[in-house]
Structure formats: C-alpha cells, structure tokens
Amino acid sequence: MSPVITIDGPGGAGKGTVSRLTADALGFHILDSGAIYRALALAALRRGTDLEDTEALCALARGLDLSFRHAQEGVAPILDGTDVSGELRTEAVGGAASRVAALSPVRTALLERQRDFRQDPGLVGDGRDLGTVVFPDAPLKIFLDASPEERARRRFLQQQAAGREQPLEDILREIRERDDRDRNRPVAPLKPAADAVVVDTTCLTAREAAAVVLAIARERGIGR
Ligand code: DC
C-alpha cells in the first residue's frame, strides 16, 4: 500500500497550502477532499437539487463528472468539463458543502472516489475525516488547527486577493457556524484521530507548518 499523510482540520487552518507544500517536497499525489464535497454541492445548486434530498444527492455523487487537472498552484477541479476553482471557493458553495457533507449516505457514496487517490509513490490528503474514516491506516495523521479569529483573517486576505470583499465579522461568523456543524454532526465529525499529531498554526506560516509535517514524515521513514 502506498503511504498516505492525512491533514485534517477546520477551514482556514492552512490545510490546502500545507498539503501542497508537503506533497511537492515528497513528490506525492494530492487529494483535496473538501473540493469533492464542494463540487457535489455546486452540482446540486446548479441543478436545483434539494440539499436535504439524500437520495438525489447520492445519485448525483455517484455520477459526479469531476476530475482534477495539474495547475500552477496544485490541482484545478474540473466539473462537467469546466474549471470551477473560483466557484468552489465561494462561501455559498462552502456552506452548501457543509450541509451535504453532514449526510451519511452521501459520505459513503464519495468514499471510494477518495480512496482511489492512494497511488504510488504516495498521497497527501486533506479534509475533515481522512485520518479517522477514509484512511484509518495512514502512517502519518496530522490535525491542523488555528484560532477562529486567525482563520477568519486568512480567509479575509484570500478573498481580498481574489477581488471579493466580505466584512471580517461576517467571515468569522460563517467560520464559527461551519465549525459548529462540522464538529457536531453525528457522522464523521471533525476531530483529531486518536493517533494524530495536532499542529497549531495560529503563529506559524504555512512553510513552517509544512516543515513540521516533513520532519515527522522523515522521522517515520515516509517518502524519499
Ligand atoms: O475544506 P473545505 O472548506 O474545502 O471543505 C468544505 C466542506 O466539506 C466543509 O464544510 C466540510 C466538508 N468536508 C467534509 O465533511 N469532509 C472532508 N473530508 C472534507 C470536507
């Protein structure tokens, strides 16, 4: 089995950037599992599918026309033939993703799609339950965390750079609401795996956090 490094944690903790830096350093593949939930949510929104209609969402999940193409910054999600990188990052899609992700049959429908990313020479995957549910046998599990205020500040700067302005307090409220839903859902709640290493990034740059992950990977003999 190819090695997997799982990087779970709440939104804005730096999972995406830390995963990309770690995968680049090791020459590993990358799985952005949040993008899969976001793509499903976007597909549902586009089709007008009721976000509580579990059966319709499962059917959509099973037939989801989603692939990832190598891009300058990591990988770009391609949904129904078009690059949806920008659309997936909006708060509307993030909120809808969090709702569809709370449905157990939907998560099951997306499980194999995620496990298929495990290929030689190895995988770095980020999400909420990669260490607890998707890859419970991963040889290295990281849980990245940061204070809600710092995560809101990062989202704010990200959005500003993308030309979208949203008041900081709105972002902070949305982050808290989403955290609450992700942590308290009965199925695959956001929590560190029992054998995860918790890394708090409130005072770390993404490079510093990736250096911590790489040091532990080296210690455990993972990668080159
Ligand atoms: O990491 P993200 O913000 O792109 O994730 C979007 C939503 O998808 C998030 O609210 C929770 C959900 N998600 C999940 O439930 N399990 C995962 N492995 C990844 C994301």
Image (tube, rainbow, N blue to C red):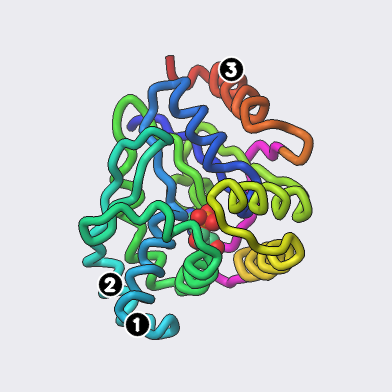
Three-letter code, disc 3: Glu
**Tag nearer the camera, 2 or 1:** 1
For label 2, the SS is helix
Seen in the image, is 222 located left or right of residue 164?
left
**Camera sees residue 193:** no
Give how far apart the Cα atoms at labels 3 and 1 are: 47 Å
Asked if the residue at label 2 sits under 8 Å from ligand 1, the reply is: no
**Closer to the camera in the image, 111 or 181:** 181
Q: Quadrant of residue 87?
A: bottom left
For the residue carrying disc 2, how many other residues have a C-alpha within 10 Å: few (<14), some (14-19), or many (20+)?
A: some
- Local packing at callout 1 (Cα closer than 10 Å; few below 14, some 14-19, many 20+) is some
- Tell me: is circle 1 under 8 Å from ligand 1: no
Which residue is found at the position 52% from the left and 42% from the top?
A: 16
For the point 42% across and 62% down, which residue is it?
37
Helix, strand, or loop for circle 1? loop
Which comes before the other along the chain, label 2 or label 3? 2
Spatial CA distance of label 2 from label 1 is 9 Å
Above or below, 57 relative to 35 = below
Q: Which residues are magenta?
A: 185-199
Q: Nearer the viewer, mark 2 or mark 3?
A: 2
- Residue underneath mark 3: 219
> Marks 2 and 3: CB-CB under 8 Å?
no
Element type at mark 3:
helix
Give the residue at mark 2: 60
Q: Are marks 2 and 1 in contact (CB under 8 Å)?
A: yes
- The amino acid type, in three-letter code, at marker 1 is Thr
| Residue type for callout 2 | Leu
